[in-house]
Amino acid sequence: MPDAPGRDDRWVGVGVGAVITRGEQVLLLQRANVHGAGTWSTPGGHVEFGESLEDAAVREARETGLHVTNPRLVGITNDVMEAEGAHYVTVWFACDAPEGAARVAASYEMSDVGWFSWRDLPEALFAPFRNFLDEHRSKHARSLDPAPRIDTERLVVRRYEWTDARAFFGAIDGSRAFLRPWLPWVDDHVSVDRATHMISRSRAGWERRSDFAVGIFDRATGELLGGSGLHNPNWDVRSFEVGYWMRADVEGRGIMTEAVGALTRMAFEVLGATRVEARMHPENERSQGVPRRLGFTREAQLRRSVLIASPEPRDQVVWSLVKGDDGIADLPAVRYGA
Ligand SMILES: CC(C)(COP(=O)(O)OP(=O)(O)OC[C@H]1O[C@@H](n2cnc3c(N)ncnc32)[C@H](O)[C@@H]1OP(=O)(O)O)[C@@H](O)C(=O)NCCC(=O)NCCS
């Protein structure tokens, strides 16, 4: 019998993926003789008629010759592979296979197999596995909450509240000449209203986890001394850029070193940072003093790379502290609050 007019004979399949890890590495195989041939993915394939999803994941994973057990649901992706005319819903399971060597056991479907560091995956990834990684990474990133308040010996470093607008405007207004050479935004702050607007933007940045501006307050008096923040997060790399400014009258007391040190410790401890960097004009000696005292490395001068407080692009120096650096242990002691 002919199909009813307009009926679409394409179909959506159900697949499974088995994510098997050992330490920092994940087991991948290179697909052959199937769609996505040549690309790398975890073991996986179709669900067979009547089979449970877990059994399908374990069966597919055993095609690598490993003894695979304990499938746990970790994600679902909707994988439309337009170019190949394929559409699968893939259900992903983490599975255990702590021992044994993986091999090309079902050679009609795979051409190679190997363990890869999560940080150094092959270029050509099977589209559903790429979708899984994208979802997994952003879900993980979204689940990370920076500490909204950090107490140090002398300071409280915290997210701005609406009530900070007047103090914020006062701090900027009293230090314009001091801040202007280095900060492009100083003269945007012409009123308390503008400061309120800044606070609104900064709170939205926290909500979206795209920018984490903080005020630096004297722990004893509650006075606003300056500002800082973790900016430009790259959640895949887990890197952040720290920025800072202070009132002219509180310079030279080690306040910024303490505040930036606390934020940097929080980035490594709470956000799982791989890298925290600070960027500034090469002539901004006092600004470079902050990362220098905290054990950062001066790693580059990027020539004519930014348009900050100057009509012409100018140079920027980059200081960084990365996971594994000795300096992390010496960052100031902190207490996290809500
Ligand atoms: C950049 C800026 C925050 C640096 O301020 P700072 O006072 O030099 O930095 P700190 O608060 O960490 O203080 C360090 C100074 O205090 C001294 N100090 C005193 N007590 C200290 C303590 N307990 N711990 C550490 N340092 C202490 C240090 O010796 C150092 O002084 P020195 O450089 O003369 O040796 C400030 O100059 C500023 O806001 N500038 C304008 C805005 C700006 O440039 N922002 C950066 C843009 S990239």
Image (cartoon, rainbow, N blue to C red):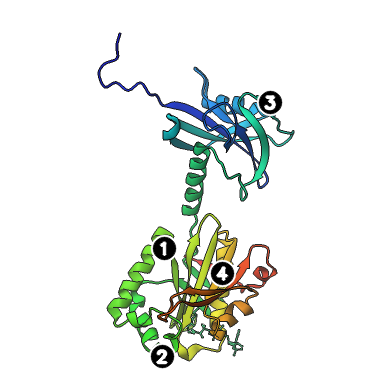
Q: Which residue is mark 3?
A: 105
Q: Compute the Cα span from label 3 to label 2.
A: 71 Å
**Residue 74, image x, y percentages:** 52, 39
- Which of the marked residues, 3 or 2, is nearer the chain's N terminus? 3
Comes first in the chain, label 2 or label 4? 2
**Which image quarter has ligand 1?**
bottom right
Q: Earlier in the sequence, mark 3 or mark 4?
A: 3
Element at label 1: helix
- Label 2 vs 1, first from the N-terminus: 2
Q: Amino acid at mark 4?
A: Glu
- Residue 226 visible here: yes
* Amino acid on which disc 1 is placed: Trp
Could you tell me how far apart the alpha carbons at marks 1 and 3 are, in whole angstroms? Answer: 49 Å
Q: What is the CA distance from the residue labelled 2 to the residue labelled 4?
A: 26 Å
72 left or right, relative to 83: right
Residue denoted by label 1: 206
Q: Residue at x 63, y 65 (%)?
A: 322
Residue displayed at 32% across by 23% down: 8
> Which of the two discs, 3 and 2, sits closer to the camera?
3
- Determine which residue is flagged by label 2: 177
Between 150 and 89, the one nearer to me in the picture = 89
Residue 88 visible in the shown view: no
Identify the amino acid type marked 2. Answer: Ala
Q: In front: mark 3 or mark 4?
A: 3
Measure how far apart labels 2 and 1 are at the Cα level: 29 Å
Residue drawn at (55%, 35%) of the image: 93
Q: Secondary structure at mark 2?
A: helix
